[in-house]
Image (cartoon, rainbow, N blue to C red):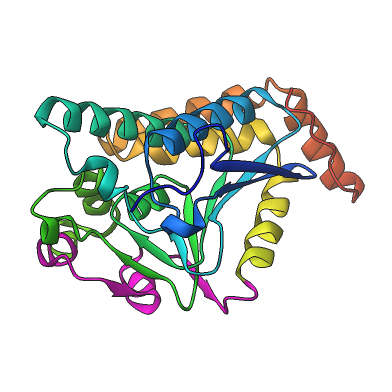
Amino acid sequence: MSSSAAPSDPVVLLERRGAVALLQIARPKALNAINQQVLTELSAWVTEIAADPSLRAVVLTGAGDRAFVAGADIAAMQHMNSAQAQAFSEYGSAVMQQLADLPKPVIAAVNGFALGGGCELALSCDMILASTRAKFGLPEVTLGVVPGFGGTQKLTRQIGRMAANRWILSGDVFSAEDALRVGVAQELFPPEELLDKALALAERMASRGPLALAAVKHLVDRGGDVPMPAAMAMEAKAFGDIFATADQKEGMAAFLAKRPAEFRGE
């Protein structure tokens, strides 16, 4: 697949919906396939969102009604040599890790195909809400290659070794119901409701304490990599640290006063 857009045309768009950033991969004629420009623009937007305290949650989706992201751009990769392919893999993995490390909730709204790099991009988010028409998979072996943006590692950590092997070694494409059953997707919605449901969830998250959200993301993402006693110690320290913030005082005062909290991220 090749891009119909000139290099100067943006392929990742940001729309502000109050405290929610709606990020859209916008190469619909190429089924939103990932190329170098997509990765560069996505990285720039993630950097901007991270630095903007007025944006407290993110919804990531794809343009059109056919694809979230159908994969990496095969036409752009076809003639890469080994060193170029490794560099592309490393850069794509770094951008997706940057998204995963964003200290704000990120919801993938998967509105169609999420294959290969698109599935890996969705797995880099904090949760996946999907259309009932969505399709998932890591079909790289059908092209004679392997996943390059962390798919073997992210999917294995998400659903376990044997389930991940079933997906990756077969190269099969799976339904939204299959994705929900194994824990890749967390909720399914009719196509016409998906974006509204994702935005509504993001808005609820954006109303929570931003320092607490960042701490929870860190604990969930890092706690599984250490033994349980160390993970519990991490949580206890985070619990103590949050009591030194204005947000903790505001949150508890608001609860006792039976009023909405007004968090400032301080």
Relative side of 80 to 245, left or right:
left
Does 198 sit above or below residue 208? Answer: below
Does 186 sit above or below residue 93? Answer: below
Numbered range of the magenta stretch: 165-193
User: In terms of depth relative to the viewer, which is nearer, 7 or 203?
Assistant: 7
Residue 38 visible to an observer of this rendering: yes
Q: Quadrant of residue 46?
A: top right
Q: Residue at x 39, y 51 (%)?
A: 33
Q: Quadrant of residue 80?
A: top left
Residue 232 visible to an observer of this rendering: no
Q: How far across and down, in percent of the image, does residue 232 sit?
A: 39, 35
User: In terms of depth relative to the viewer, which is nearer, 240 or 146?
Assistant: 146
**Magenta segment: does it hold 184?**
yes
Count how many numbered circles sit on residues in the image.
0
**The C terminus sits in image quarter:** top right
Q: Residue at x 39, y 38 (%)?
A: 221
User: In terms of depth relative to the viewer, which is nearer, 156 or 116?
Assistant: 116
Q: Residue at x 79, y 29 (%)?
A: 264
Q: Quadrant of residue 162?
A: bottom left
Q: Residue at x 26, y 31 (%)?
A: 88
Relative side of 80 to 212, left or right:
left
Q: How far across and down, in percent of the image, does residue 24 sit?
A: 58, 49
Q: How far across and down, in percent of the image, does residue 227 sit?
A: 25, 35
User: In terms of depth relative to the viewer, which is nearer, 56 or 24?
Assistant: 24
Q: How far across and down, in percent of the image, does residue 196 sit?
A: 69, 65
**Magenta segment: does it hold 56?**
no
Relative side of 29 to 89, left or right:
right
